[in-house]
Image (cartoon, grey):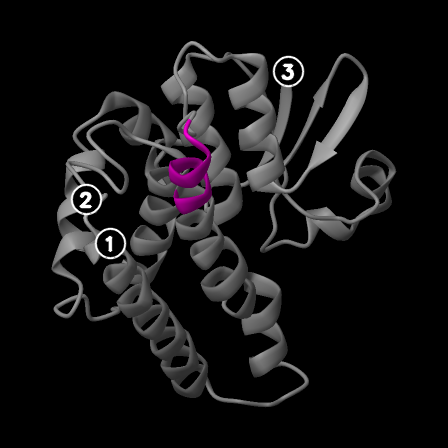
Amino acid sequence: MKLYTYFRSSAAYRVRIAANLKGVAYEPEFIHLAKGKHNEPAYKEVNPAGLVPCIIEDGQLLTQSLAIIEYLDETHPAVPLLPRDPWERARVRALSMLIACEIHPINNLRVLKFLTGPMKHTDEERDTWYRHWVEDGLAKFEAMLADGKTGKFCHGDTPTMADACLVPQVANGKRFNCNYDHVPNVVRIFEECNKLDAFKKAAPPNQPDAE
């Protein structure tokens, strides 16, 4: 399996965590987003959407981090990242989507560049935007964790897709000095996850393309 990745991409970080948890080997192909490599014709030939992550396996292309994680879960079921019970499975998906669909899209690199480029906002205004939406979104995530299903991790006592989504978001927020005083369970789970080798190995500073 070839994984197109960028060390600082939250979405690629999710997939690296999932692959590591499952022990799935992959060949990394580094796409430097900050240098615009995702917009170059060579990469567009691979992935017309020009986004990371994506994987190629058996000659087939798959995009979108949650789709990739669910594909890995179905093809390598020995270490499940989604529970078998339909209700619990839906809960893990809901937590994952709060990160991947509510918080991340309005704070990813292309949005931040648009704010300081065509929209002509200052770096300070951009960072205020970022912090607001991350802190607000994680407050909602914290509230969801209070439903009695949370354990050592987001769902029970083993990592799931929700943890693979949460850790990159919290880590990226730290780069922008987000305040996490209002989300103690989020912080606790983040710290618990980062005790595991699968999360440590996936972390941005530990990637070959890290700057």
> Relative to 13, is 2 above or below?
above
Residue 180, located in which quarter of the rendered image?
bottom left
Q: Circle 2 is placed at which residue position?
A: 189
Report the magenta residues as a range. Answer: 85-91
In the picture provided, is 137 more to the left or to the right than 39? left
Q: Is residue 69 magenta?
A: no
Name the spot of residue 177 as percent of width and height, x first. Answer: 25, 68
Q: Quadrant of the N terminus?
A: top right
Residue at horizontal 43%, vertical 30%? 82
Residue at horizontal 21%, vertical 44%? 150
Q: Circle 3 is placed at which residue position?
A: 1
In the image, 202 versus 121, the foreground residue is 202
Q: CA distance from mark 2 to mark 1?
A: 10 Å
Q: Secondary structure at mark 3?
A: loop
Q: Circle 1 is placed at which residue position?
A: 145
Name the spot of residue 83 as percent of width and height, x first. Answer: 39, 28
In the picture provided, is 83 more to the left or to the right than 187? right
Residue at horizontal 35%, vertical 79%? 132
Q: CA distance from mark 3 to mark 2?
A: 29 Å
Q: Main secondary structure of the magenta part?
A: helix
